Image (tube, grey):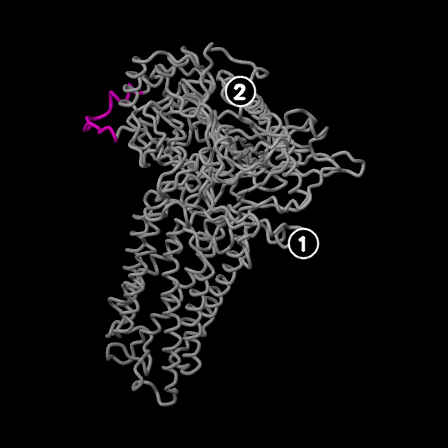
Amino acid sequence: MAKQFFVPAHVDPSLFVINDALLGTGGIGYTICYILMTRQSIRDRTYAMPIFSLAFNFAWEIIFSIFVADAAREKAVFGLWMLIDLGLVYAVVQYGANEWRHAPAVGKNIGKIFAGMLAWWCIALYSLSIWWLNPADPVNPKDGKAYKGIRGIDADELGFWTALVDQVVLSVMSLAQIIIRGNSGGSSYGIWLTRFVGSLAGLNMNYAYCWWMWPEAHGYVVIPIVVLMMVTWVIADLAYLVVLYHVRQTEVVLGDGRKVRADQDFFYTNNNNNFSTLFGMASYSDRDEEDLKLALALSMQQSPPKDADRLGANNEAVDLTSDTEEEDDDMRRAIAMSLQECRKSSSPRPPKTQSQSHTTLSEQRASHEIPSLPTTRTASGSAAPSGQMGLSGLDRKAMEEARLARCGKRKRDPSPDQPHKQIASTAPAQSRQPTTFDSNPKHGRELQYPRGAIKRTFATGFPRTNDITIDEVLQAESVNIAVVSSFMWDSEWLNKKLSPLKVKQIWIMNAKSQDVQQRWVREMEDAGIPNLRIHFPPMGGLIHSMHSKFMLLFGRDKLRLVVPTANMTPMDWGDKVNNWQPGVMENSLFLVDLPRRSDGVMGKKQDLTTFGKELVCFLEKQELDKKVIEGVLKFDFTQTDHLAFVHAILEEQSITCTSGGVHKGEQQQLSTGLPGLAKAIRDVHLDDVKEIELDYASASLGAINDNFLQRIYLAAQGKPLTTTSAVSQVRRHFRIYFPTDDAVQNSIGGPDCGGIISLSSHYYNAATFPRECLRNYDSTRRGMLSHNKLLFVRGIKNDGRPFAWVYVGSANMSESAWGAQKVLKSGQTGSLNIRNWECGVLMPVPNEKMADMKLNDGAIPPMSVFRGTVEVPFVCADPLYGQYGDKQPWFRVVG
């Protein structure tokens, strides 16, 4: 504002007091807003302010603080904003590519693009300022105004016009940004409130008051274009608040903290949803692209490029599941021929170090959950468009020569599971994870877990115990084919761990709509990703989601079966998602190493152990490729006779093996859901029970009531549901471990990491909900949240012998996972209605451990009985008195 002694006499001096108060309110609001934006951007791994707006805003602060501002107070405020804005600029450079997966060229060069925008705005604003403030010929001079002692120059109007344009651009572009993103990444109610109040006070209210008190000097405030612009940004900001509320109800939080819109199905590729950009293929030279297309064409059953004829390429298709010597030779010759042009045209290069020659698909992009239905397609089709098909940093010549050299040194694998579309098989890169107590330098050559084991997932920043890293689970260098099933995904992270360039892969995904399935298959085909295809199990009828999680890791000497509670995201596996935060989410997993059959032939399903039969039945019901199931039958299940594979599957008819959907038939005949759990108890001879105690750690709770508790209690005893099978005081036997709201709020990752932990307040507030069974999930790794699904059962048999077993798998404590079923008035049991695909493993505590417990006669074993079988990951609550008290559980409903 102008100094008071230049102001006409009729202007009330209080104008300056109100002016300072309104500008101060705006300054404080924006200072807090910038700080909150920076913090939220880093948390969500995105940028909060639109890039164009940020460049405009930053340039405004630079020009006004250095060239325009006259008072020391104004220079200090603008300088402070500049410093805080450096955090927002950092977020753009560090995380900007996450929001431009549909335009990799923009994501790759986002720092340069921002720098160009900033330079342009600085030049534009500087040019405008020196023109407006020219002492010899100022723009729109006014009586009573002064600038640097020169009367008539109105710097306030210059600030008004530039700030108003900046505000309109910011508000409209922010609204467009959150609509396009469909998530609240980089946003919060606090950010909105401080920005809105700061802008309203410092811009609209301040200048409107100036016009009211001194209209002849501020007539520009009420011209129509100004009124329109003032109303425009206010409406845009209010609309932003409405959109923010709605996207927060449906968004999905990924493993690394990023947020995505719920309707982006499985792979989130921002707004374009192009599968090739999902994997972030970097541009390559035309000649290199032709060579790569030729090699990928043979591996993906597509026609080679037109120029392939000049190389004499053999374009015979290679089946993903095939494994013949002739096809391996074809592939080897095709890649060798595709390298001929590189040898002829490439200029001399400095020798690469070993670390530089490692092959990783580091540009691949993240994905998340989609809801599923039956369609299986091979990922064959056309190559990705020109300019997006190169693999940055891939020295194919050196890697292929190294691969061929190794192939000459080893004997041919006896398994039809060996992949032949390998581009390279270099030595493994140095692991970033600490070594495990179970680490084995020979990897697949020896069986680490021949009888099966249950492990905790690794957690960055915590001491190693009975845990295991994702790298130790995968043993990627010894895997030929991987079948991976998960509810949520981060493909960029997974493909760094298990590259499709080296390992044939089938991903079992969750998509209910057939249109969604077909769209993802098409985009997979268009991307031309080698050795990778996607599969959707049947999703008809009542089935809502494909929630089962498992891995089949085929190697030369063994098949490793893994059944985790974790999704395929770094957060669920305890991987580092940034440079400062330890692990935030813990899970558990079962894994077993099955040796190849000594006779080298494919076994028969009926000759398997019960565990093996149910596993194969589950795979059949998921309609996996026949070759996958035949591959499973080439391995020996003898050492799994003490285990049980438990599932929930889709089946329209009464049959001994079922999963998901409506199941009719006698209770004893059903082998899925809770009847399947009861059958598993009988199969491993843990029935004939007098009394049991149950401790269930669940990441999601459904509409639990006494009827459901009784059904679980009976199934855990191996008993069927009947009209006479009521359990008195069943709540006294149950402890359900689920976090309180305080536990989530105060956890390492905070509430943003609680999105996959769900309980509806509607369920909890129902009179039938067994609140007294709830116990706070307090991890022994303090501050970690849990995505575990663990059922610990301890009991005593009718003959007085104690026993204990544990279930680990994908099934939460809900009827969607285990099946809803009632006893009809006729005395018969009704249909079993299952809504999810689920799977898990039941492992008993060895009898030798029971013998060492030295229990009193008739005593139920304590929780310490599981020591040596499974590490109980939570602090065990008092058996009678809960820990909730007046505290509320964490409420979050995931669609």
Asked if residue 354 is among those painted magenta in the image, a careful observer would answer yes
Q: Residue at x 63, y 39 (%)?
A: 713
User: Within 10 angstroms of label 1, few (less than 14), some, or many (20 or more) residues?
Assistant: few
Disc 2 secondary structure class? helix
Region rendered in magenta: 339-355
Q: Which mark is residue 629?
A: 2
* Residue that mark 1 sits on: 767
Q: Residue at x 39, y 38 (%)?
A: 458
User: Within 10 angstroms of label 2, few (less than 14), some, or many (20 or more) residues?
Assistant: some
Asked if residue 106 is among those painted magenta in the image, a careful observer would answer no
Residue type, mark 2 in image: Ile
Residue 145 locus on image (x, y percent) = 31, 80
Q: Of callouts 1 and 2, which one flags the residue occurring earlier in the amino acid sequence?
A: 2
Residue 10 locus on image (x, y percent) = 38, 89
Residue 394: image quadrant is top left
Query: Is residue 99 shown to the viewer in this render?
Result: no
Residue 746 locus on image (x, y percent) = 44, 55
Residue 124 falls left or right of residue 728: left
Q: Residue at x 51, y 33 (%)?
A: 549
